[in-house]
Amino acid sequence: MAVSRLPLIAGNWKMNLDHLQAVAFVQKLHWTLKDAKHEEDSVEVAVFPPFTDIRTVQTLLDADKIAFALGGQDLSTKDSGAYTGEISGAFLKQLDCRYVIIGHSERREYHAETDEVVAAKVEAALRHGLAPVICVGETAEDLEKHGAAAVPVAQLEVALDGVASDADVVVAYEPVWAIGSGQAATPQQAQDVCAKLREVVAAKLGAEAAERTRILYGGSVKSGNIAGFMREPDVDGALVGGASLVTDEFAAIIRYQKHVGV
Ligand SMILES: O=C(CO)COP(=O)(O)O
C-alpha cells in the first residue's frame, strides 16, 4: 500500500539554528548523506528552518544543487497588508518553499491557534501553491479522556474543510505527549491513528487522495526507532524535531529509508 507514496523525512528546526548555523548544518548534512546520493529517489528530505534562515538555505540548496525540499514553520492566513510580524504564503513560495507546517501543537498551545485558524492557513497555503503539513495530535489529557484518535481525527476534519480533492497535502500525527518527551508512541499506536486519519482524508477528499496523501508520525523520532514506524503501512515518514538538529542522527533517520529502498 505504501509503495506509491514517496516517504518524507521532515526536519522541523523550531526556533533553533540561526542563518549561519543553518548553512553549516545543511552543508554537513549534505556531505554526510553524499554516499547515498544515488538512492535519493527513495526518500524526500525536507527542512523547515526559522523564517530568517530561509533565504540563506534556499541560496545554498540552489548553489550546491542539494535536493532537500524547503518549508516554512507557519504562515499568515492573509496574503499581504497591515499585519505586523506575519509572513505571507506568497513570500514562502517566492523562496522556493514546497511545504509549510500548519497547526503544530506549539502554535496551538502558545499562540492559541484554533482548528478554524488552522483551516484558514491550510487554505492560504494551497492558494499559494504550498503543500500544507497539517499537524494534529492529542494531549496526554485527551488521550486519557477520549483515547488516541478522537482529537486528531476531529482536528483533521476541520482542517480539510473545503479543500479540493486534488490538493497536495501532508498530514502529521504528532501526539503532544510524545513531542520532545523522549517517550515516542509505539509503532502500533502510530499506525492505528494514522489509519484513522487516512479514513478522514478519504471521507473529505476521496479515495484517490487517501491513497496518495502522505501521513507522517512525529514525536521523539530518533535513528533508533524510525524503523518501527516506517514498517507500518499507514506511516509514510516522520516529522522530526530534536533529532533533526543533530547531523548524524538526522542522516541516520534518512539513511534508514535509503537502505530499505522503500
Ligand atoms: O514537534 C515535533 C516535530 O514537529 C517533534 O519534536 P521531537 O522530535 O523533538 O519530539
Image (tube, grey):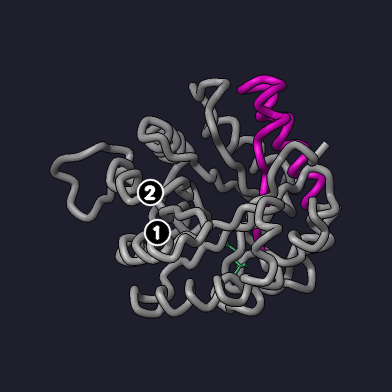
Label 1: element kind: helix
Residue situated furthest left in the rendering: 82
Label 2: element kind: loop
Q: Which residues are magenta?
A: 190-219
Residue 96 badge: 2
Quadrant assignment for ligand 1: bottom right
Q: How far is disc 1 from disc 2 in space, using C-alphas?
A: 10 Å
Would you place residue 92 above or below residue 53 in this image?
Answer: above
> Does residue 39 belong to the magenta stretch?
no
Q: Nearer the viewer, residue 56 or 165?
A: 56
Q: Residue at x 32, y 66 (%)?
A: 56
Q: Earlier in the sequence, mark 1 or mark 2?
A: 1
Q: Nearer the viewer, residue 185 or 257?
A: 257
Q: Which residue is mark 1?
A: 62
Residue 29 badge: none
Amino acid, disc 2: Asp
Q: Is mark 1 within 8 Å of ligand 1?
A: no
Q: Across the whole image, how many numbered discs are drawn on residues?
A: 2
Amino acid, disc 1: Asp
Callout 2 crowding tier (Cα within 10 Å): few <14, some 14–19, many ≥20: some
Between marks 1 and 2 in the image, the one whose residue lies nearer the viewer: 1
Residue 215: image x %, image y %? 67, 44
